[in-house]
Image (spheres, rainbow, N blue to C red):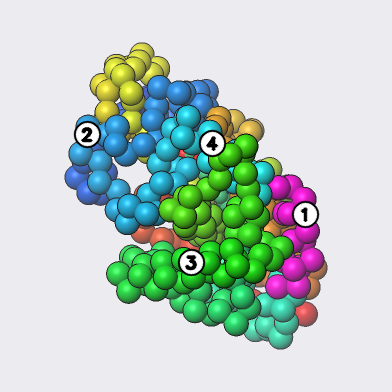
Amino acid sequence: MGGFHRSERVPPRRETNEATPVKITLPDGTTAWRITGHDDVRQGLADPRLSLNRANSTGGYSGFALPPALDRNLLNLDPPDHTRLRKLVAGAFTARRVARMRDSIQATADRLLDGLSGTVDLMAAYATPLPIITIGDLLGVPAERIDDFRGWTDALMTGGSRDAVVSMYAFMADLIATKRADPADDLISAMIEARDGEDELTEDELLSLAFLILWAGYENTVHLIGNSVLRLFDGPADTEELLRVANPVPFAIRRFPLEDVEIAGEAIPKGQTVLLDIQSANDASTRHLSFGAGVHYCLGAPLAKLELEIALATLSGRYPDAALAVPAGELKWRDSFRSRGLLELPVALTR
Ligand code: HEM
């Protein structure tokens, strides 16, 4: 991927070279074991003794509280429940389906950039709408409802108002009923059709999956695109390098040991919260773990890469002279330990 005009260097990322593992206090006051380093994090991601199911927490983990109908999702399940669900959804979310989205993603990128000039906040004008429109297309949200869908999604992502949860829930349940009656060429219809012998997805599982795909697919991709545009002001980088250094997900989903475990020489008691530090793993290697590893490896990785590549190629193709409009040190970052992303990305666009 070509770079844009060089800017002063982007601010250094946090240092992650302390010994692994370290006991830390999370913003909610609970404690967690933080695992750093490439090998330990990669092993932890694929370790069957580390459960994702919140029911196995004994360390007071709070985290997001989703309504029960939305909680039966892949990132809160372990094998064998996870295996069954993942197989069903992977059969619907195929490489062919993703490849067929290329033209619509390109059309969205072109449309969003049409007419932009001067100083523009690229987060608001480009990096944010592109993934939400793409996920809406993927799931089969009708074009005339995309604005509603985006409004609820934004409300959910920025603190989760109850009204937005209720509206989104009703909307998704309705969408599933519509697709059941009148299937189309989209992921929800394909998930309704998905069968493994006698097995099929239940209503709660369908709803949870639609929500998870929306949730996992939206915000991470927004910030992957934003961080990558910023990184390209420092010079060219290919997709894998961008994923390594512009990774928006500092930590994997929290894990809870099913038994007392020893990781890197440290005994971690059963049920404690374990955080696998993906960013430190990336810093310590030329290879990245940004999409995780093992049975929970990101299901959306091919789509996220396709969106990233189209977003960057379209932007640099149209605006090869794009330049940061403020000093890199003045950029505002999200205040969240779960996400590394920009609040705004003011860029000067000239044709
Ligand atoms: C099109 C966009 C995306 C979709 C639809 C998507 C979807 C998903 C889903 C469904 C899972 C759960 C898989 C499972 O438990 O079996 C997952 C996991 C994951 N995704 Fe994505 N994702 C997207 C983009 C991204 C991006 C941009 C990143 C970061 C660069 C990312 C990082 C991850 C990670 C780290 C996991 C594993 C979490 C863990 O094991 O703790 N995803 N994704």
Q: Quadrant of residue 265?
A: top left
Question: Who is closer to the viewer here, 18 or 101?
Answer: 101
Q: Secondary structure at mark 4?
A: helix
Mark 4 or 3, nearer chain start: 4
Residue at 73% x, 82% y is: 114
Measured in 3D between alpha carbons, the distance from the residue under mark 3 to the one under mark 2, in whole angstroms, is 33 Å
Mark 1 or 2, nearer chain start: 2
State which mark lies toward you, 3 or 2. Answer: 3
Magenta stretch encompasses residue 62: no
Residue ID for mark 4: 84
State which mark lies toward you, 1 or 2. Answer: 1
Residue ID for mark 3: 172
Q: Are circles 4 and 1 on residues that touch, CB within 8 Å?
A: no
Q: Secondary structure at mark 3?
A: helix
Q: Are circles 3 and 2 on residues that touch, CB within 8 Å?
A: no
Q: Secondary structure at mark 2?
A: loop
Measured in 3D between alpha carbons, the distance from the residue under mark 3 to the one under mark 1, in whole angstroms, is 25 Å
Residue at 25% x, 46% y is: 62
Q: Which residues are magenta?
A: 94-108
Mark 3 or 1, nearer chain start: 1
Q: Is residue 297 above or below residue 209?
A: above
Measured in 3D between alpha carbons, the distance from the residue under mark 1 to the one under mark 2, in whole angstroms, is 43 Å
Mark 4 or 1, nearer chain start: 4
Residue ID for mark 2: 59
Note whether residue 131 is visible.
Answer: no
Measured in 3D between alpha carbons, the distance from the residue under mark 2 to the one under mark 4, in whole angstroms, is 28 Å
